[in-house]
Structure formats: structure tokens, C-alpha cells
Amino acid sequence: MVSMKKPSMILTQSNLTLLGGAEFTILKIAQHYNPVIYTAEYNAKNTYPEFKEFDIRVISKGSFSRIIPYGRASQGLDYGLAFYNLKIKEHYDLINAHLGPSHWIRNKNERVIWHCHTPLRDIYDLYSFRMSKRPAHTRPFYMLGAKMVRSMDQQVVRRIEQIVTNSPITLARIRKYYNRNAIIVGTGVDYKEYENDGDGKYFFYPSRFSPNKRQEYAIEAFRLFKRKVKGYKLVLCGPVSTDQFYQDYHKKIVDLATSVGDVEVMPAISQRKLRQLYSRCTAVLFTPKDEDIGLVPLESMASGKPILAVNEAGPTVTVKNKVTGFLVNSVEELARRMAEVADDKPLAERLGKNGRKSAKDEWSWDAFFKRYDSVINRML
């Protein structure tokens, strides 16, 4: 088989400011194709340090943040208009767009393949949820901003040449909100970088702090677990956006953790430290609301640890119930499963070994890029 020459690629991403799962997938794609990266915001200290190896170009943003007094709405419009109005002048074979609204690059540029990690959830499936969390006086501004973003988003997505996505969950959202189809390419995990280094008697939930990640769900389960099983901790870690909305949520979680006790809330940490925490935990918890796919279950399995996740959306794709972990339907059930893996060491070991095998056989980056290269070559 003759190998294809890698294309001249432009990669667009709304911002590079966090150590998140989507950002890690983008980093792996960048390492594979060596693109020029356009972004509306870049903070080298707060995201993966490997991004420094690439040609990153920060584009100018708009001024909605000075007009609309709500952070996420104004930020979305600023980011969106930056890409909407950008005309790429250099030569390229294709543009690989990632988190919205960086896919708005299609307005003035052709040959766009949108890697849809998720539609803009704040204006689609999480719109009512987000509105319910807002102070009443900010809701009219949020509604106005969301309406504008939704209109422009629909206009642009109709013109995108190809959409790929990470899971059947996200595909269903793309079909529902855009009436478009997409190719599922999944995601990957560096399973060779993870290991099982025993049981340090703590449960681990790494994820950015956001209401839709539902860290309070994990804490409440731990509260119930503590009543029956002593000597364990819960460790939460992840980045926190500078947006006041997320800062307020983080404070709520810290206060709740303090009231429950034996809950450690850590900031974003290096990949090395993250893998160490995976390696020593009893099991990994994953409790987000309607997650698209999520890297946490894959990293848990790569570490040979049981994954205890909510029985909805993304985890139903990555977690094999009672084989690599447990899918739970309530806080109470999560607490019971935590007690099971804490008390039954052979069970925890069996789930962990099954998970490690699944990470290796089904979720390697080699397998991912076979699919990705195929889609890109067909488009070219």
C-alpha cells in the first residue's frame, strides 16, 4: 500500500487555555499533521506545554465583551466573529476546525473538515440548563447572545464540506441540531503512558470544574460511601476558567468538599502528576451531564482501574458495564459501587485488567489515525 503524503493543514481552535480532553486530542492531531494553528486565545502556561512546538497564530477578537455584560455570551461572539471574518491567505490543502466557534472559519474559506467534539452546547442541548443557572438580570443578555450565535452557526455549518465526530452521542446531536451527517472517528489514549501502581485508598475524579461536569454528584456519593466505609479519600482535580461563572461553581465545590470532609480539591496538574494519581487510586469516578465521549474513562482503563460512571451519553460508549467498570443511575448506586470495589479487591483487579485490555485493543491512537487519515485522504 502506497502511503499518502500528509496534507498542508491549517488547524483552528477557539482557544488554547486549559488542560482538557479536547485540547489533548487537538495536540495529538497537531503532532500527527504538523499544522499551522489559528486560535482566538492562547495561554502557554495553562495548556499543554507541547503546543509551544507549533506555529500558533492568535487572531484578533471583537468587542462584544465590552458591550454584553455576560462573559460566555460575549466571549462566544468575540471568538466566533474572529473566525467568521478571517480569510486565510497562505496555501493549504484543508482546514481542520475543532471546538466551536472555530468552525466559523468556513465563512470565508473552503475545504473545511470540522472535527465536532460537540455542537455549541450552550445554545443547543444545554441552553435551558445554562439559563437556569444564571442570575435573573443576566438572562436577557444571554438569550440575545445565544440567538445571534445560533443564527450564525446554522448558516456556517450548512456550508462545511465534511464533519467528523467522536461518538454516536455527538452524531445524534449533529443530526438533531444541524440536519447534517458526520463520520465517527472516536478518540484515543496513550495507554503505554499509564500504569497501575497499587491502591492508595482514594477515589479520583479529574475534570475541569464546570456545572455540567457535576463534581457535586461525586461528592454526594462519597458522603454516602463514608457512612459505611472508613479510611478513604476523594480527590478532585482540574482547571478552572477565569470566567466568574466557573469561579463561583468552583467555590461551591470547595465549600461542599469542606463540609463533607476527606475530599481534596486540586488545581490543574501536569500530565505526569495526573498519571501518578490515576495509578494509585482505588477507582475513577466520572459523573458529567450528557458528556459527548470523555477521555477520563479511557485514562482510567489505561491505568488498569475500575471506572464508575453515570449511565448516560458518552460513558455508555466507552464503559462496558460490569466488565471494565460500572454504569450507575443515581448517587446512591454510585456509593454502593464504590463500596464494592473498595471491599472486593479481586473484583477491582478484574475490572481494571479488562479495562487495560480495552484501552489497548480499542482506543489506541494508532487505530484512531488510521480512521482519521482515511477520512482526510478521501476528502482531498
Image: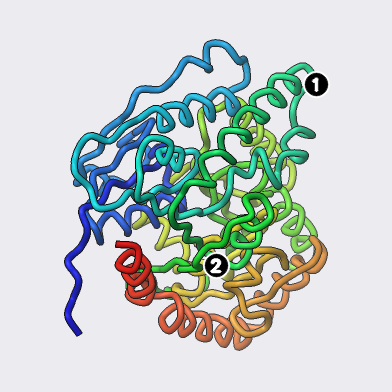
Amino acid type of disc 2? Pro
Question: What residue appears at the point 32 percent right and 28 percent down from the top-left corner?
Answer: 59
**Residue 72 at what x, y percent from top left?**
58, 28
* Label 2 environment density (alpha carbons within 10 Å; few <14, some 14–19, many ≥20): many
From this view, report whether residue 140 is shown above or below residue 18: above
Quadrant including the C terminus: bottom left
Residue at figure coordinates x 30%, y 36% from the top left:
44
Q: Which label was assigned to residue 202?
A: none
Could you tell me which secondary element the residue under label 2 belongs to? helix
Q: Is residue 220 left or right of residue 183?
A: right
What residue is shown at x 40% (from left), y 38% (from top)? Answer: 105
The residue under label 1 is: 136
Considering only order in the chain, which callout, 2 or 1, is on the residue closer to the N terminus?
1
> Which residue position holds label 2?
297
Q: Nearer the viewer, residue 350 or 93?
A: 93
Q: CA distance from mark 1 to mark 2?
A: 36 Å
